[in-house]
Amino acid sequence: MGEKKIKKNKERCTLQEILTIIGGKWSMSIIYALFPGKRRFSELERMVTGINTRMLVKELKNMEANGIVVRKVFATVPPTVEYMLTDKGKKLEPIIDQLYQWGVEYVGDGVT
Amino acid sequence: MGEKKIKKNKERCTLQEILTIIGGKWSMSIIYALFPGKRRFSELERMVTGINTRMLVKELKNMEANGIVVRKVFATVPPTVEYMLTDKGKKLEPIIDQLYQWGVEYVGDGVT
DNA sequence: CCGGATCCGACCCGATACTG
DNA sequence: CAGTATCGGGTCGGATCCGG
């Protein structure tokens, strides 16, 4: 379990690899919801409109594995879990923001 | 054929919609290959490593429908087709570039 | 040279029900 | 509250053959 592929060559990185990390249907929306700060699981479930439990869990796990979010568990009587972005994840903020701005500017209309 | 849904409300634009446009496996790589200027079909097929004909055609059509690229046909004896980015498509350059830089910086390693 | 058409497997994603 | 388990459909993407 503590075994992960350790690759130290940073040179081989394709756009496709990046998209497998944050190109999913929900990834960016979740990251977006985490920009202001930490969120609980149920908060995210409410904020990311249309997502269901399974997908949220799956995406969060994936992001954790990719070092984009951190998961923090509190041993309270009703279980509490918080998620927040890592530095790596926070660096995506300007990018996602610009992407969103691009979309707002041109949506469904390409001929002026 | 000249009938498309005309939506004039620019306010409803989600990240998911944007990703359906440029979130495919090959979209960004193709756009990336088109940054320097216009390219012929076979050029793209060579530049975008791993793609096959069907996918390239499909993506290019999609991008054309979304106003990201323009298709120019020359009635030469061996058929010639050129593709180039529209202004809308060119605006993606800084975004894709930053995304790529992000990927280069952290690839497969999230714990510093 | 450029692309259409078809077949087909793989994976993504959604709904629901259940557990600690 | 925060997940896990299972089922099933729909879409994505790859190989290959065919046509202008």
Image: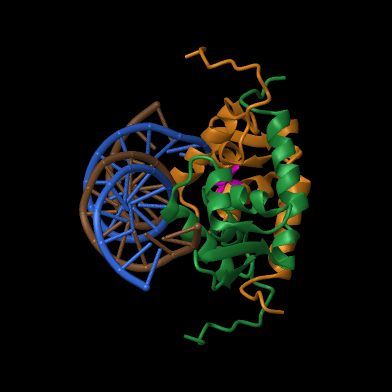
Chain colours: A orange, B green, C brown, D blue
Q: Which residues are magenta?
A: A22-27
Residue at the front extreme? B77
Question: Of residues A76 and A52, which is closer to you in this image?
Answer: A52
Question: Of residues A99 and A76, which is closer to you in this image?
Answer: A99
Q: Is residue A41 above or below residue A103?
A: above
Q: Residue at x 57, y 51 (%)?
A: B44
| Left or right side of A110 for D12 | left
Question: Does the segment drawn in magenta span residue A67?
Answer: no
Q: Residue at x 74, y 45 (%)?
A: B97
From the image, which quarter does the C terminus of chain A lie in? bottom right
Question: Of residues B88 and A106, which is closer to you in this image?
Answer: B88
Question: Of residues B61 and A98, which is closer to you in this image?
Answer: B61
| Left or right side of B50 for A37 | right
Residue at the bottom extreme? B2
| Relative image position of residue A75 (x, y in whole percent) | 57, 25
| Relative image position of residue B64 (x, y in whole percent) | 57, 68
